[in-house]
Image: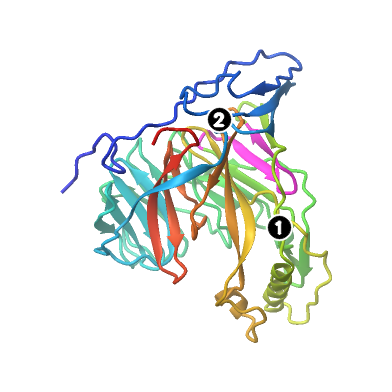
Amino acid sequence: MRLPVTRDPWSMRSTVKSQHRTPTPIPSLLLIACIVAAAACGTHGNSDVTGDWEGTVVEEDGTTIVRTTAGSVWGGAAQLEELFTLDEEHHGPPLADVRGIVAARDRFYVLDVEEGALQVYDTTGLYVETIGRSGEGPGEFRRPVDLAVDATRERLYVRDAQLRRISVFRLDGSLVSTWNTPTIPGLLRPMALMQDGELYVASNLNPTAVPAEWRQGMVSCGREGVGRDTLAPPETVCSELELTFAGTTRGAISVPLPFGPERVWALTPQQSFVSGCSDRYSITYSLPDGRRRIVERHNWDAVPVDRLEAEWHKAATTARIRLDDPGWTWSGPDIPDSKPVYNAFFTDTGGRLWVLRPGAGRELVDGIQKPDNPLDYFRKPRWEDTHLLDAFDSEGRFLGQVTLPPGMRVRPLPWIEQDRVLALIEAEDGEVTVRAFRIQIPGENP
């Protein structure tokens, strides 16, 4: 039975949402500097929200630089108020290896690669049904690793890495079509769905080159086939630090230095690339019309790398490389003293930019510091990152940081829409759940 949608289908009760007014447009001159406070520029319509954002907006030759120098639009860190846990009564299959979380209409969808199926829940979190099963036939999966939803067109997209295809379902679970995808060895980047309904998947843009010269990009994937349109991320100046070892006959292979600077990019639903180098808090929007917006934040603190954490990552990286090159010894640069500024971006349909940042390392008591078996570095890791989540509005101003609950995972990325969040939570005993939250902004009425 299909449950009716209430005014607040997530929690079955009314809530008050934050209402920020659109900022006053800034005249387009050759060079403009606007040093403002959030209240002066009309950044909130809710009188309970008392932000203190300060920054500059500079425009020149088609590039707008939005720089946060102090404060935030929210006036502090936002909290995640837990609403409910999906399948809290355990009526559905247990979750093990979740690879995708989305919401559409009055349903939540969770993709589990170990179960080989898509689990469906209603807006109270109750288990409804399972879409798909293990197999190779229409609508079946071998290794489903990615999930996207188009609520407007009522479509679900599930990418299967082993079968190299995307299964397209209606929201009710009926199969619409199956599309082939390119082979994507080792690429974990999620699919990107555009506002016009076009779907893009990650791919190597120059697969015939040696591995060290491979370049990632996005190619369209649909009924007409793969590669009708190819999008390459912009070149980003970045002094990446890598460790090189002897690979296959195709040449040497490089792996990133733990906590070293890397190029980070994502394709947004507006078909803009968001990119940057993680050695600095600067993020560039490359807009479809050729213009650029650069978002900078100056009021942030570097996260130090613990000495024991660095030693473990150095040993784990050495063990990983020696699986391919047994005689390899560490000859690269030292592990940095601080974490990268960020390691992932994503946007929501409202145009807000979410920046995932590595937080302080967390030592796991059941992990092994110096295992005899090199594979135990990965089976029983001693250290893992916590995470920070920063938010920017569609104009590039720093909204604030969101305090994440203990055990929250960022793979798969949390699903965020307006003030609602779906996220994967892993308890200390290893139990995995998906929980629904509401973003509680400082000073906002609950």
- Please state if 308 lies on the left or on the right of 115 as rendered: right
Classify mark 1: residues with Cα within 10 Å, few (<14), some (14-19) or many (20+): few
Residue depicted at x 69% and y 37%:
297
Q: Amino acid at mark 2?
A: Ser
- Please state if 423 lies on the left or on the right of 332 as rendered: left
**Within the magenta stretch, is there residue 35?**
no
Is label 2 in contact with label 1 (beta carbons under 8 Å)?
no
For the residue pair 121 and 426, the one nearer the viewer reads as 426
Residue depicted at x 45% and y 41%:
439
Span of residues in magenta = 269-286
- Please state if 315 lies on the left or on the right of 417 as rendered: right
Residue 292 versus residue 409 in the image, above or below: above
Residue depicted at x 71% and y 65%:
306
Distance Cα–Cα, label 2 vs label 1: 38 Å
Residue depicted at x 15% and y 49%:
1
x%, y% of residue 348? 48, 38
- Please state if 88 lies on the left or on the right of 322 as rendered: left
Residue 159 visible in this rendered orientation of the protein: no
- Helix, strand or loop at mark 2: loop
Q: Disc 1 designates what residue? A: 209
Q: Disc 2 designates what residue? A: 394
- N-terminal of the two: label 2 or label 1? 1
Q: Residue furthest bottom?
A: 372
| Residue 92 image-quadrant placement | bottom left
Residue 316 versus residue 391 in the image, above or below: below
| Residue 111 image-quadrant placement | bottom left
Classify mark 2: residues with Cα within 10 Å, few (<14), some (14-19) or many (20+): some
